[in-house]
Amino acid sequence: MHSGEQKPLIGFPSSKLKGNVVISGDKSISHRAVILGALSVGETKIKGLLESDDVLATMNAVKLLGSTVVRHSQGSYSIFGVGTGGFLEPDNFIDCGNSGTAVRLLIGAVSTNPITTSFTGDSSLRSRPMNRIIKPLSKFGTEFHGRNYNLLPMTVVGTDEPVPIVYKLPIPSAQVKSAVLLAGLNTPGKTTVIEEKATRDHTERMLKAFGAGVEIQESEEGIAITVDGYAELNPLELEVPSDPSSAAFIISAGLIVEDSTLTVRNIGMNPTRTGLFKTFEEMGANLHYEQTENSSGEPLAHIHVKSSDLEGVEVPPERAPSMIDEYPILAAVAAVSEGDTVMRGVKELRVKETDRISAMVQGLKSCGVDVTEYDDGFTVHGKGRGSVKGDTTVKTFFDHRIAMSFLCLGLTSENPITVDDGSAINTSFPQFTDIMANIGARIEELES
């Protein structure tokens, strides 16, 4: 969460990154584990939970809604749930900090409970529109009172007589899909979401693991996901896989820094999340996957990485949902690849933590990279390893992924790259700088 205290960081040219890396738990799965644990009856035990600002915001929220949360050790928690429909009316605002996932999933979860809940967040989250969830959730009978209608702070007046809905997603969004499915848990009958393109399916997998009735059918309209209402969720013992979106930064550094060999362990390999790895392979990346045990219904692998000479590619727009958070780091990698990397059909990036298209284009240009910007994406005209000048300070707009992407690029640029504020990295990947130091990457705080 933005405290106002800027923390500039510098990425210095580095070589020979080596090591065996264990990354903290997946952010998407951590949020869902906490919320579904709170909605089950009894004690859910979670290991490997990501203790980032975003996930801690979700944890504080379920406490305000009546659940008990006990921390045993780093990443190890018990959540004593109140059962579906058991949320209590909170006596304070629920502050979701910088987390769009937290606020959208939580609004879905409370919307069919007969309680009134008020949500807020940091300045970035308060500027992100919520109409994409207001539209479907209103159909259950829920009322919303937001600033300018669709912005936080927002009060959600849950309904005590929810009606089940069938909702076709106008834009692919795992967060909107999840909000509707969570609302459906405390609704009579069956609630269905139809998506044209597959998005992250962590919610469906985890709902099944907790014992909810979930059906998935493919039809001409797309993929229909149906959840049974008035579900009784059973508590679970689960281990959260390592986050592929965080692993993306370590893997990228291993690919672009010369003479590097890394292994990143137990990465969640859910096919709805691995678009970046597929893209890297098309670019010529030396990646080798070693399948390991499944956990919480998710496929896992150790990923072995060797530095590679990469070539630019065109990323198919239909791949976007499986790598929507990875475009910033792909853009940084594209800068040191040979030839053009085209990223189109990703207008959604303009409404992330910041306008990520604009932020990446601006940052890359300041590093001396040739970029063409479009309304729905951009093309990076890469000139190979060693072609990026650096010697600049990049504006991150308090976006964790922008900050980490440019620090990785600094490892292989001619001169160091400074990011104006690295404090946001804690929202998703608190171990980032420590892991980088352990594998031999030089990232330092700017001495004031």
Image (cartoon, grey):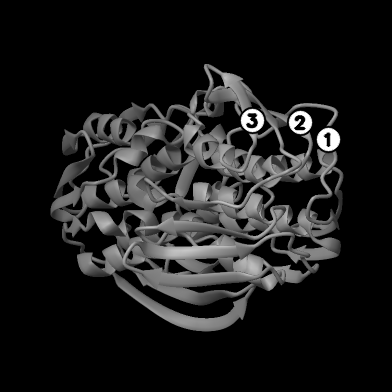
Disc 3 to disc 2, how far (Cα)? Answer: 9 Å
Q: Position of residue 29 (x, y in %)?
A: 61, 59
Q: Secondary structure at mark 2?
A: strand
Which of marks 2 and 3 precedes in the sequence?
2
**Residue type, numbered disc 3:** Glu
**Count of numbered labels shown in the rendering:** 3
**Residue type, numbered disc 1:** Glu
Mark drawn on residue 143: 3
Which of marks 2 and 1 precedes in the sequence?
1
- Do the numbered discs 1 and 2 sit on residues whose CB atoms are within 8 Å? yes
**Residue at (51%, 47%) from the top-left corner?**
176
Disc 1 to disc 2, how far (Cα)? Answer: 6 Å
Image: 45 above or below 144:
below
Q: Image quarter for residue 44?
A: bottom right
Instruction: Give the quarter of the figure containing the N terminus.
Output: top right
Q: Secondary structure at mark 3?
A: strand
Crowding around mark 3 (Cα neighbors within 10 Å: few <14, some 14 to 19, many 20+) is some
Q: Position of residue 47 (x, y in %)?
A: 74, 65
**Residue at (36%, 31%) from the top-left corner?**
355
Instruction: Give the quarter of the figure containing the C terminus.
Output: top right
**Residue type, numbered disc 2:** Thr
* Front one among 55 and 159: 159
Q: Secondary structure at mark 1?
A: loop
Mark drawn on residue 116: 2
Q: Which residue is mark 1?
A: 89
Q: Which is closer to the viewer, label 3 or label 2? A: 3
Q: Position of residue 364 (x, y in %)?
A: 26, 36
Which of marks 3 and 1 precedes in the sequence?
1
